[in-house]
Amino acid sequence: MNPIVPSRRDFLKGAAAAAAAGVVPMSFVKLAFADPAQDFTFAYISDAHIQHISGNKFVRNWDRGLIRAVAETNLLTPKPDFVMFGGDLGQLGMKEELDHGAEIMSKLRYKTHYVMGEHDYYLDLGEYWSKLFGPHWYSFDHKGVHFVVLNSILTHDDWTFNKWPSAEERMLQMAGLDNPNGSPFMVGEKQRAWLKADLDKVAKTTPVVVFSHSPLQKLYKGWNFWTDDAEEVQAILAPFDKVNVIYGHVHQIQYNQIGNISFNAVMATAWPWPYPNSYAQAQHTMPVLTVPMNRADPFFERDATGWQFVDVHTGRVALKYNLYNNTARTVAWNPATGKPEDTTFQDPAKRVPPQVHY
């Protein structure tokens, strides 16, 4: 018997119902291929940043965001094939934070895969994370798609092992958004060699989806929206016909196209970040192909929270963003220009001017 595959109308109906229910920042992804029997969906939750206070007390606004995301993911229709968590489960990598996050995530009714974030890693270099969730990088196949999970938040050994008097100090330094004592992220030579060996076994016509925490592109170094060896990773992915990179870390909507690779950021359940140029940095700090988000008020907590679902048709990505306190947006592949576009937002006359803060 052939499996019953939900139609696009059913999928959109379920997405609309979820939006009406006030879904917190999570992503709902639909992959569509020529063979409808291979269509499937998965959900994406990211950047919970659970922070321990004392005893059994945690920063409520952050852990409640994850609790709500898990509850609403369990109600999704159609049911996702699996759930992806995109990193930064804890804020300072403490056992109490990761245990609390793991307990919340255990309520999910679906198989869950995990990406590690820098907030999970730099206290004990991922030792406790591995006990809870497994390896730092790995791959798996699902219904004709090859999925790769990378640990993209590594950095230079000298910074990691020799610079700081304690593991706690190292964690605090890496946790700062615009801390000049931080260090750029990277995938690293060992992991790149593993990635190449892994992909050598995959047909070049197979759709590839890569999950990372930091963007596998160079967006803004001052806030570590950056991966130092991004071009080397992109070169390994270049031979494949259809590649999609999905990442967290930036707590905002981003999209880009570099060669054959589509890049998409997902929302956080904790808080939003404004775009770097919201703070009046020079425009040249953003890559040419990246279109900044239309944010009416980058300092309002819910302006950059929401959820999205993604259609992938013949390897091209179209995203529907449902945003709270902001206009819904659709970013779709334009075959005429060969890149993703949000034509409504890209019309300057339709942009919402940012508010001034003193």
Image (tube, grey):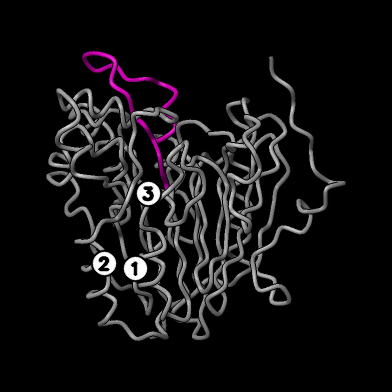
Give the residue displayed 32% in from the left and 20% down from the top.
58
Q: Secondary structure at mark 2?
A: strand
**Pick the front one: 250 or 21:** 250
Residue 59 forms part of the magenta stretch: yes
Q: Which residue is mark 2?
A: 139
Residue type at tag 1: Phe
| Residue at image location 64% in from the left, 65% down from the top | 340
| Mark 2 Cα-neighbour bin, 10 Å: few <14, some 14–19, many ≥20 | some
Which quadrant holds residue 353? top right
Measured in 3D between alpha carbons, the distance from the residue under mark 2 to the one under mark 3, in whole angstroms, is 15 Å
Q: Mark 1 packing: few (<14 Cα in 10 Å), some, or many (20+)? A: some
The answer to whether mark 1 and mark 2 are in CB contact below 8 A is yes
Of circles 2 and 3, the one toward us is 3
Residue bearing the label numbered 3: 213
Measured as percent of width and height from the top left, residue 45 is found at: 42, 46
Q: Position of residue 55 (x, y in %)?
A: 21, 14
Give the alpha-carbon distance from disc 1 to disc 3, as whole Å. 14 Å
Q: Provide residue 193's location: percent of width, then percent of height.
A: 22, 68
Q: Which residues are magenta?
A: 44-66
Q: Where is the N terminus found, in terms of image quarters?
A: bottom left
In the current view of this chain or complex, which residue is farthest to the right? Answer: 349
Q: Which mark is residue 147?
A: 1
